[in-house]
Amino acid sequence: MKNINILIFLIIITFCFCSKENKDRKTIDRVKDVIKNEEIEKSISEVKKTISENPKNPEAYNNLGILLSKKGDLKEAIKALKKAVDLSPLNCSYYLNIGNVYNDYGVLDSAIVYYTRSIVIKPDYIPGNRSLGMVYIKAGRNKLGLSYLKKAVELNRNDFDSQSSLGYGYLVVGDYKKAVEAFKKAIKLKPEYAQGYNNLGVAYRRLGVIDSAIFAYKKAVELDSNSVSYLNNLALMYSDKYMFKEAMELFSRSLKLEPFNPKTHLLLGGIYFRKGKLDSAEMEYKKAVKINPGYAEAYCNLGSIYRNRKEYKKAAKNYEKAISLNPEFMLAYHYLIRIYQELGKKKKVKELEEKYKTCLLYTSPSPRDLSTSRMPSSA
C-alpha cells in the first residue's frame, strides 16, 4: 500500500510539472483522475484479498469502505463500513467513517445518526463531537452545531481542527468577531496553514476591516501561491480599495493556474465593469457561461451589461435565464423588475414583485466570499 501511495504521489507531481507547459489544464485533470481511479481499484483489490484471507478483520472492511467511498460507490462503501461495525461494535471511529460517507453524499440525517453513535460510545471523542457540530451547521441547525463544536474545543483547546471548525461555525452564523478569535487560535497552533489565514481574511472582510483582511489573504498566498481561491480573495480586497492594477495582476495569475475557472472570469469581468470597460466585462462573463452554462451569476452580470447599454430586451433575457437557473436569485429579480418598468410591462412587474417578496421572506443572501472559505476537515 505504501508503494502505491508513493507511486500516486510521483505520478501526480509529474503531471503537475507538465501542466505548466500544457495550455489545456482540463486534459491534465482528466488524466490525473484516471490515474487516481486506477490506483484506487488496485488498493480495493489488495484490501479484498486481505479480507478473503481474514474475513473477521474489521480494519480491512473499514479501509474498503473508505476506498469505495472515494470511488463514488456509496452503497457498497456503507455496506463495508457497517460490516466493520458488526465486527467491532465499540469502535467509535468506524461509526464516524460511516457518518463521513453519508455527509459527503449529502445524506445529512444519516450522518447525524452515526456521528451521534460515535459519541454515545465515547462522549469525549473529539472527532465525533466536531463532525456532529459541522453537520448540524451544514443542516442549518446552527445553535446545536455550535454547542458540539464548542465541546470539541473544550475537550482539547490545542486541537487545530476543532478551533478551525469552530471558526467556520461562527462564520456561518455571522458572529465574525468570534470567528476571528477562533481562526487566530487555530493559526497559532498551525502557523503554516494557508487555509487558516484565508478563513481569517474572510472573517475580517465581513467585519469590514479591509486592511486586516488583505494582510491575512496575503499571508495565505505566501504560504500557497498556487491557490486560485486565495489569489481571488486577495484580488477582491484590492478591488474594494480601487487598486485595480494589483487586482488584475492577481486574476491573471489565477487564470494561468486555472484557465477554465468560471468564477475567476466572472470576478475579472467585475473589475472591467467597475472600470467602465463594458466590452471587456461582457467578454469575461461570456467566457464564464461558456465554461459553466449553469452559472446564474454570470447571466445576471451579462444582464447588467445590456441594461447599462439600454439594450433592455437582451438584458431581460439574461436576467430571466439567471432566475431560471436560480429561482431564489433576488438581485436578478430586482433588476428584471426595473427592466420591465422601463419597458412599461405592468403585468410582468406585478408578477415579479410578488415573487421577489417571497424570496425576501424565505432566503438570505450569502456572503460574497464565504464560498471561498472551505469547511475544515471534520476528522
Image: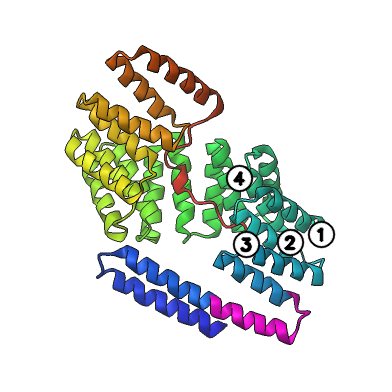
Residue carrying label 1 = 121
Say which amino acid is labelled 2. Answer: Tyr
First in sequence: mark 1 vs mark 2 = 2
Q: Where is residue 337 in the image (x, y as percent from the top left)?
A: 37, 20
Quarter of the view holding residue 226: bottom left
User: Is 343 located above or below residue 290 in the figure?
Assistant: above
User: From the viewer's perspective, is 315 left or right of 67?
Assistant: left
Tag 1, which secondary structure? helix
The residue segment tinted magenta is 41-58
Cβ atoms at labels 1 and 2 below 8 Å apart: yes
Count neighbours of disc 2 (C-alpha within 10 A) and say few if under 14, some if 14 to 19, many if 20 or more.
many
> Does the stretch in magenta take in 342?
no
Residue occupying image coordinates x 52% and y 82%: 4
| Front-lying residue, 41 or 313 | 313
Say which amino acid is labelled 4. Answer: Lys
Mark 1 → mark 2, Cα distance in angstroms: 10 Å
Quarter containing the N terminus: bottom right
Quarter of the view holding residue 315: top left
Residue carrying label 3 = 74
Can the viewer see residue 88 in this picture?
Answer: no
Can the viewer see residue 15 in this picture?
Answer: yes
What mark, if any, has residue 95 been given in the picture? 2
